[in-house]
Amino acid sequence: MLNTLWLIPLLPFAGFLLNGLFGKRLGKGFVTAVALLASLGAAIAGTIAVVQYHAAYPSGERHVDLVYNWIASGSVKADLAFQLDPLSVVMLMVVTWVGFLIHLYSVGYMAHEHGYGRYFAYLNLFLSEMLVLILGSSYLVMFIGWEGVGLCSYLLIGFYYETDYAPAAGKKAFVVNRIGDFGFLIAMFLMFAYFGSVDFAKVSQIAAGGGIEHWLLTAICLLLFLGACGKSAQIPLYVWLPDAMAGPTPVSALIHAATMVTAGVYMVVRSNALYRLAPNAMMVVALIGALTALFAATIGIRQWDIKKVLAYSTVSQLGFMFIGVGVGAFTAGIFHLVTHAFFKACLFLGSGSVIHAMSGEQDMRKMGGLKSKIPITYWTFLIATIAIAGIPPLAGFFSKDEILASALANPYFPQWFNALIWILGTLAAFCTAFYMFRLVYLTFFGSFRGTHEQEHHLHESPWTMTLPLIVLATLSAVGGAILGWPHRHFLAAWLHPIFPEIGGVPEAQYEISPNLEYGLMFVSTAIAALGIWAAYARFYKRGLAADEQFAAKMPAVANGMENKWYVDELYAATIVRPLEGFSQFLWRGIDALIDGLLALLGYVVAAIGDLLRFFQTGNVRNYALMFFLGVIVFVWVLA
């Protein structure tokens, strides 16, 4: 497998072709078998490749599998090649195995939906493109997967195309991501122009070798980060992700929690050599991440749609990852990416199990008292909620604590900046614990607030849905301790080879004194516990009455949170409608003027033709006379 890495993305792509071409005719059994075998085959093939890689490269060197030479023009070269190194190994394991679990879950969740074959064809295609993204050996191959997952996101968000909201949400995601992709493209053009290559290793080697002007490195890093803001939903391009909940819930778990939205974080870590040479760009990354983490968390406090709460939670947690990579703690960012894949996939799939039990209802105001009705969903959901809140020893505690500790202990940025990032991150962590346990108390505790018919149909999900929940809940509980126990950080040791030696700039890891580390652990745990207690005090017994009381006391704040601080309305007023008005002006004004001028020109040409037609009599004597008059005019002009 090590020398045929291209087979790993090819397997789910074959599943896409088979289900797309024959799924509708051959039925659900065929579709299910192909989709599960394709995703499981990719996971097994990826695991075999990882085992072979570790045996062949125990020191973590880069292995490249060249498919063919794609571009060769003068000094500019780009190959279609795939690679394995410690970073792509981590991403490969997360994407394939979490992807397989979500494929398995989808069998139960989508069993009675129309478009079953189309859904799994799109899901297989997404997995294939995501594997191209993480296995590509250059920015160009990564960009193929980058655009591919963007296409699949559009198709899966708009899966329920008969509705009005789903196609609009898909179009919004597609357009917003194009803004970020423009930045990615310009960054690649700059690499071609100044480095002569877009190969990861070549670009890092040239940058680390020195001689590249600081403005160029900063520009490339900021443009790459613009692409990351689009794909990973950071301010100001985060607005597409909450609307993306219009797609089926397993799509939300796979694309918008565990894999696609983390592509921006992966890209920044992959480009760590460039970012470490552009500290100003790193400060921008950290600040945007911190602002996004807190801003999205405040919105999550007042949402009623169970999936919308998790959507804003995803935006917030992605902000934490960018805090990590922005302060130079790249390993901490990847660590949180992995733990987030566990607990957020579990939470989204758990919300899908709740929606399944509630016959499609997503409004938490119509839920309540589900703890005893769907116990497996409840306990797995609770474990993942404790993990995301940051309570030890569950997974989210280790990764989130490492990010916040790294932000405060960063020796390369001004102390006031470090303190600002830590404060914003800590406030976001408090909000996370609060709104997640608000969700738990409103959904699973109290009395049932839905209809009698919904209550009559309450039931636990089938095993195809509960088994992935149990596996992901287990990983949410123990994954953090396995990968990143303090002072025995397996992930840090594993990822160390991907960070080239560069002096005088932020390192991928730096030492944090034990006293500071344990003190910050205590503070972060206390903050999380305070958020949980606040949610318990407000919602455990009072339920919806607590929200009504808050809305009565602070209506402006409550309305602002509930309406997402009116950011969509602001964008519509300042960007969308002015652009629509300008487009109308170009269409009805400028375009109409151009069309009129061209029509006038055509009329003049036709009129001249009609006039000249009268001189075409067919009489030779008339032609001779015209020739004679022409000669006279010519002689007269010449004289």
Image (tube, helix red, strand yellow):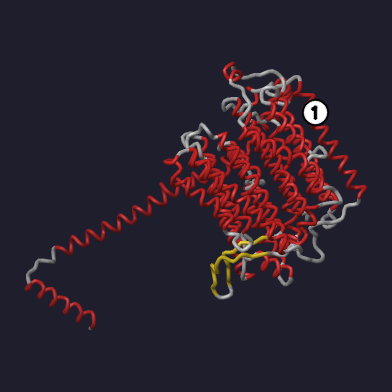
Give the structural element (helix, strand or loop) at label 1. helix
In-front residue for pair 331/59: 59
**Quadrant in which residue 623 is drawn:** bottom left
Q: Residue at x 71, y 39 (%)?
A: 343
On the question of residue 169 being in view, the answer is yes
Q: Residue at x 57, y 40 (%)?
A: 573
| 137 displayed left or right of 493 | left
Q: Residue at x 68, y 56 (%)?
A: 50
**Quadrant in which residue 389 is drawn:** top right
Q: Residue at x 68, y 66 (%)?
A: 201
Which residue in the rendered view is the most extreme toward the bottom?
639
| 428 displayed left or right of 135 | right
Which residue in the rendered view is the most extreme toward the right?
515
Which residue in the rendered view is the most extreme toward the top?
452
Residue located beneath label 1 in the image = 534
In-front residue for pair 550/341: 341
Q: Position of residue 237 (x, y in %)?
A: 62, 46
Quarter placement of the C terminus: bottom left
Q: Position of residue 37 (x, y in %)?
A: 56, 46
Q: Amino acid at mark 1?
A: Ala
**Quadrant in which residue 616 is drawn:** bottom left
Q: Position of residue 579 (x, y in %)?
A: 52, 46
Q: Position of residue 629 (x, y in %)?
A: 14, 75
On the question of residue 569 being in view, the answer is no
Quarter placement of the N terminus: bottom right
User: Is 538 situated above or below 96?
Assistant: above
